[in-house]
């Protein structure tokens, strides 16, 4: 067990730390913005007039991405359903709307390519340092498990990450069952596990699962995006092991 310190907050008897992926370890803003824009254009080509409201729903405003918006924090399934709702408003049947949304997102992903977004500066060093203290580390993301696997493989993180978990079918964040399942997979208690994430959903999920604590990270300085965090940091290296 380790004692973790972030700014003026200390967490004792910690066995594991779970990290979100997008916006926490991975600088995925450019990828997510391109994905949303391409999918919206593909849907608009079939149903003219849907692009603008879809982009607003995705959290895209011009060239900027809302880090608390749909495309940034929702699971793939939730994104499909939200997009389908806009399509259904045009008179399409629900199942046809879902099909159009799913195909557009699939094609947008293929068009953009599978290259992973870069790690935030210092992420690799922090994961290596924390792992060397004996802490169990995992990724718990709203992305699909396949995307998490690809991310870990691309950045060669398998020596440090012991759990690669995404949201496929079933509940998404902030449902605490995800955190509980991750802890069970790692063989640790929620009360000995920290959550590090960049969204309100990460904080709510961990709090409702009775986690040891929630560390909110905002690389862009918007603490409202991690409302509910026990402590807010702007860089991962602010997570310090003071006793192991």
Image (spheres, helix red, strand yellow):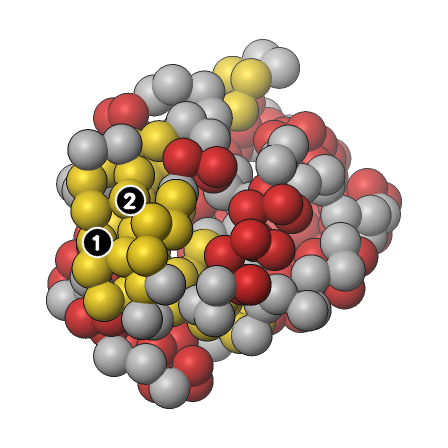
Q: Are marks 1 and 2 in contact (CB under 8 Å)?
A: yes
Left or right of 221 on screen, residue 42: right
Residue ID at (47%, 26%): 219
Label placed on residue 143: none
Q: Is residue 66 visible?
A: no
Residue 9 in view (yes/no) = yes
Please, is residue 191 above or below residue 212 in the view? below
Direction from residue 197 to residue 127 in the image, left or right: right
Q: Residue visible at 25% across and 26% down?
A: 224
Judge by depth and name the residue closer to the eye, 206 or 166.
Answer: 206
Residue nearest the viewer, comparing 87 with 162: 162
What residue did someone put label 2 on?
Answer: 5
Crowd rating for badge 1 (residues with CA inside 10 Å; few <14, some 14–19, many 20+): some
Circle number at residue 11: 1
Furthest toward the top, the residue is 62
Quadrant that contains the C terminus: bottom left
Using the image, determine if residue 176 lies above or below residue 128. below
Q: Earlier along the polypeptide chain: callout 1 or callout 2?
A: 2
Q: Secondary structure at mark 2?
A: strand
Residue 162 vs 32, above or below: the answer is: below
Q: Is residue 74 above or below residue 28?
A: below
Residue that sits furthest to the front in the current view: 243
Real-space CA distance between mark 1 and mark 2, rounded to the nearest whole angstrom = 6 Å
Q: Residue at x 14, y 67 (%)?
A: 210
State which quadrant residue 153 falls in: bottom right
Horizontal and vertical percent for residue 217?
Answer: 38, 35
The quarter of the image holding the N terminus is: bottom left
Location of residue 206 in the rendering, given as x and y in whole percent from the top left corner: 24, 60
Residue 164 point in image, percent of width and height: 57, 71
Crowd class of label 2 (few under 14; some 14 to 19; many from 20; radius 10 Å): some
Percent across and percent down for residue 88 are 46, 49
């Amino acid at each position: 067990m380790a004692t973790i310190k972030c700014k003026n907050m200390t967490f004792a008897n910690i066995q594991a730390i779970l990290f979100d992926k997008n916006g926490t370890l991975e600088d995925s803003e450019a990828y997510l913005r391109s994905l949303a824009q391409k999918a919206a254009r593909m849907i608009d080509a079939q149903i003219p007039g849907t692009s603008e409201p879809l982009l607003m729903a995705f959290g895209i405003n011009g060239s900027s991405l809302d880090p608390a918006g749909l495309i940034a924090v929702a699971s793939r399934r939730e994104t499909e359903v939200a997009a389908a709702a806009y399509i259904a408003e045009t008179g399409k049947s629900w199942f046809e709307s879902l099909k159009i949304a799913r195909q557009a997102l699939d094609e947008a992903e293929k068009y953009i390519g599978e290259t992973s977004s870069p790690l935030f500066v210092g992420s690799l060093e922090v994961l290596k340092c924390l792992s060397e203290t004996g802490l169990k580390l995992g990724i718990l993301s709203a992305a699909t498990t396949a995307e998490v696997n690809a991310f870990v493989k691309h950045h060669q993180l398998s020596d440090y990450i012991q759990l690669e978990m995404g949201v496929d079918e079933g509940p998404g964040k902030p449902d605490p069952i995800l955190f509980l399942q991750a802890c069970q997979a790692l063989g640790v208690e929620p009360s000995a596990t920290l959550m590090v994430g960049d969204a309100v959903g990460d904080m709510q999920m961990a709090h409702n699962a009775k986690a040891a604590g929630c560390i909110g990270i905002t690389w862009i300085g918007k603490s409202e995006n991690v409302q509910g965090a026990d402590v807010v940091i702007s860089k991962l290296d602010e997570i310090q092991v003071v006793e192991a």
